[in-house]
Image: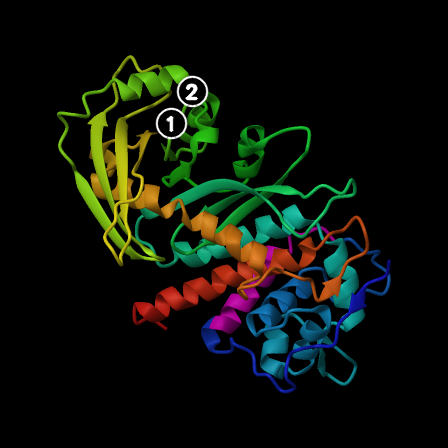
Amino acid sequence: MPCQDATSALPAGTEPVLGDSADLHSYRSLLECLEAVPEPRRRCGIRHNVAVVPAFAVAAVLAGADSVTAISEWAADVPAEELAALGAWTDRRGRRVPPSRSTFRRVLRRLDGEAVAAAFGIWLKARVMAGLADAAAVIVALDGTTVRGAGTKDGKAPHLLAAMICGARAVLARKDVDQKTNEITQVKPLLDDVGITGALVTADALHVQKETARYIVADKRADYLFTAVKDNQPSLFAALDALDWENTSVAHVMHDRGHGRDETRTLQVLSAPEDLGFPRAAQAFLIERTVRDPHDGQLRPAAAALGITSRSRARGGTPEVIATAARGHWDIEALHHVRHHAGRGRATTARWHIRPGHGRRPQRRHRCPAASRIHQHRVRTAMGGS
């Protein structure tokens, strides 16, 4: 089935969201990162290299475009200075010419999704790290999700594993999880080419695996924090559950009110036993959550979770850091929600339809970094930055 573009919903003359000198520099750095993406076309007749097309797509999505037609219309209205920053082709008269609608449609359909995700991850990480003085402050969340509204050649929904910088919601890497395997085996391929030295890597109960812990600490020179230890690791769960939590004082309290609930989370922390039998374990923790209805004060069912981390208190693993990292891990769940709903509060219905076997993932590739970029802008604005 050929690609069918819906009529654009982008008003004529819509101005780009970005455009100051700092963002022009961001365009150029993005192009440099995207140079690593393999060229899917034959060399003959190419005017725009492969990095230019997704760069224009990201900028257009930031401006509100939600279809190939809208992307091409936005590109046609971009001022010359931004066309140059985005790498637009120069014709014989010296005019900058953006990619055409057919070029966007053809290239976006054929891009290597994992290569694009890796390139965006490098770009986003550089932007986040530029505002941090200490790499140890970086928290990277690992989590997987099944992509709704998309399908593989066999008709099944694809499952993705992602690594994301919490707070900034910047995706560092993404990996397709084949139907014949699972998330556990894909952690190493996901992170092999990602620089996370000094970071604190969070993951849920599924990833509480000795090899994963060893890989994060020994190979990647980072720290792990598993937000929950459950019955899939019975001996480890029993050992943590047997610790003297009853006589351990609460080290940190977090209180949140919103989304129809009044939530209190308490944190207790103990040094991990030397005979725990889990690689590089430094501290164990217990998080207990109580939730009340904000209207009538009625108590809802409470929940508790045991966790473990390789970051000792002496190396910055304070109760505040542990509580923030455990809570921040849910940022990646919010990211998955954005991927599913395309940032518009409704289920995604692709405005540009892809032939069977290709699903809708090309649009999602660009919405994900775009959402990260928007979130970073909102964070800077809230902090009074530029």
**What's the mark number on residue 233?**
2
**What's the mark number on residue 8?**
none
**Viewer-proximal residue among 141 and 357:** 357
**What's the mark number on residue 229?**
1
In magenta stretch: residue 37: yes
Q: Say which quadrant the N terminus sits in.
A: bottom right
**Hey, which quadrant is residue 110 in on the image?**
bottom right
Image location (x, y in percent) of residue 43? 83, 58
* Residue neighbourhood size for the residue with mark 1, other residues' Cα within 10 Å, grouped as few (<14), some (14–19), many (≥20): many
Q: Which residues are magenta?
A: 23-39
**Viewer-proximal residue among 191 and 9:** 9
Image location (x, y in percent) of residue 160? 60, 42
**Hey, which quadrant is residue 94 in on the image?**
bottom right
Q: What colouring does the structure picture have?
A: rainbow
Whether residues under marks 1 and 2 lie with C-beta atoms below 8 angstroms apart, the answer is yes
Instruction: Tell me the chief SS of the magenta region.
Output: helix
Residue depicted at 51% across the width and 61% down the height: 371
In magenta stretch: residue 259: no
Instruction: Give the amino acid at mark 2.
Output: Gln
Q: CA distance from mark 1 to mark 2?
A: 7 Å
Q: Is residue 189 left or right of residue 98?
A: left
